Amino acid sequence: MQSWAAAAVPLVAGSADAEPLRLHDSASDALVEVRPDSSTARLYVCGITPYDATHLGHAATYLAFDTLVRVWRDRGHQVDYVQNVTDIDDPLLERAVRDGEDWTAVAERETALFREDMAALRVLPPTSFVGAVEAMQEIAQFVERLVSAGAAYRLPTPDGSGEDVYLSVEAAPHFGQVAHLGLDEMLVLSAERGGDPDRPGKKHPLDALLWLSARAGEPSWPSAFGPGRPGWHVECAAIAVRRLGAAFDVQGGGSDLLFPHHEMSAAHAEVATGDWPFAKAYVHAGMVGLDGEKMSKSRGNLVFVSRLRSAGVHPGALRLALLGEHYRADREWTDAALELGRRRLEAWREACSRERGPSGPDLLAGLRRALAEDLDTPSALRLVDAWCSAEGDDVHAPAAVRDAVDALLGVLLD
Ligand code: 5CA
Ligand code: ZN
């Protein structure tokens, strides 16, 4: 589907790859060096389920990966960036029924709002922005591959009208190697996050739904197993494998996706392709909460990007508010964070409108060093603060810093 317009990214002078880029990989629970095999870096980030507007948790996650894209670009890489849109799934259908709306209208409206929010925040668009519905045929074919591999089985639907298809997780040799959880923990998380460990007849409680046979009153698409729609994990596995191939550089999303979603997507891909790893690093952003709870559509404790925008909050201030804490940190959204973002934007603008300042190359080297170490934006922001509050006689620095802040942090100091 159509993504959104890309903000221009200025080229920043100087060598960008003095230090290796290291990111926290959830599968090894360590900082790992991320070094794309070629000039193109390959990134998959799990996209929205468009049944409600973009909240600050989503924004924080997409800003984290936008920082990665900007760091890669600064290092001279092109980025093959794939992001899906789960534009058919239970929560979307439930919301449409609740509001008496057509599910496609809900998905289209919320996806359009997401594009606007991302463009306003100057998040660089993915190179492939792929809806599950438009990828339906390839997802159904991917399920066929899993069936042909002998890794799937059918289970009659509760009313006996059809058969659903499940993946045997035991067919994936490395199942469990992404999240490293014990069985009990996996069972709890699976039940909480869209799985059905208690469904009678399953061979293993964690086996993942591949194809849900058509239910009365719900949309369905044709497949070799009859009309129906795909499970959630197979959507991302199919979309990623086809566009990025095996062992792509980074699989990303919020930490709520580590299990089951990323564990399962990797298992699906391994069974379909025989390749491992699915991704060389699994990178997870922390959860943004409000009043002590994770911000989530199902909890309803949301602060929407679009509401803040229409209340006149400058997107640059919002960006700085969210980048002011490390992407991996679980955190609370507070007015104080937004206020700090506002003050920073103002101080940075003022400093960049001066005729001279402290050394531009020194600041740039510091920014690159901070971001190379697991995208340490809080340190990067403090370096810019320090530059702004010091004096110096580098007449090229204000323009160079403006460009660096634009290119690496996505904030326009106009
Ligand atoms: N469509 C699936 C992924 S394939 C999905 O999780 N959609 S979502 O709309 O629920 O979330 C979109 C992205 O935002 C995911 O990467 C998710 O991990 C992240 N996310 C959701 N809630 C939060 C939150 N409170 N804080 C940070 N990130 C969040
Ligand atoms: Zn996903």
Image (cartoon, helix red, strand yellow):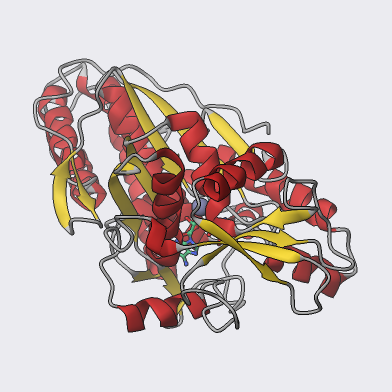
Left or right for 82, reference 97: left
Number of marks drawn: 0
- Residue 335 x/y as whole percent: 44, 69
Residue 63 can be seen, yes or no: no
Q: Quadrant of residue 153?
A: bottom right
User: In the image, what residue occupies the spot 80% across and 61% down?
Assistant: 214
Along the viewing direction, whichever of 169 and 51 lies nearer the viewer: 169
Along the viewing direction, whichever of 187 and 308 lies nearer the viewer: 187
- Residue 144 x/y as whole percent: 61, 44
User: In the image, what residue occupies the spot 14% across and 20% down?
Assistant: 394
User: In the image, what residue occupies the spot 51% across and 73% down?
Assistant: 193
Residue 346 to residue 170: above or below: above
Quarter of the image that includes the C terminus: top left
User: In the image, what residue occupies the spot 15% across and 18% down?
Assistant: 15
Q: Quadrant of residue 20?
A: top left
Left or right for 299, reference 124: right
- Residue 280 x/y as whole percent: 27, 41
Residue 232 can be seen, yes or no: yes
Left or right for 75, reference 184: left
- Residue 352 x/y as whole percent: 30, 30
Left or right for 230, reference 296: right
Residue 87 to residue 366: above or below: below
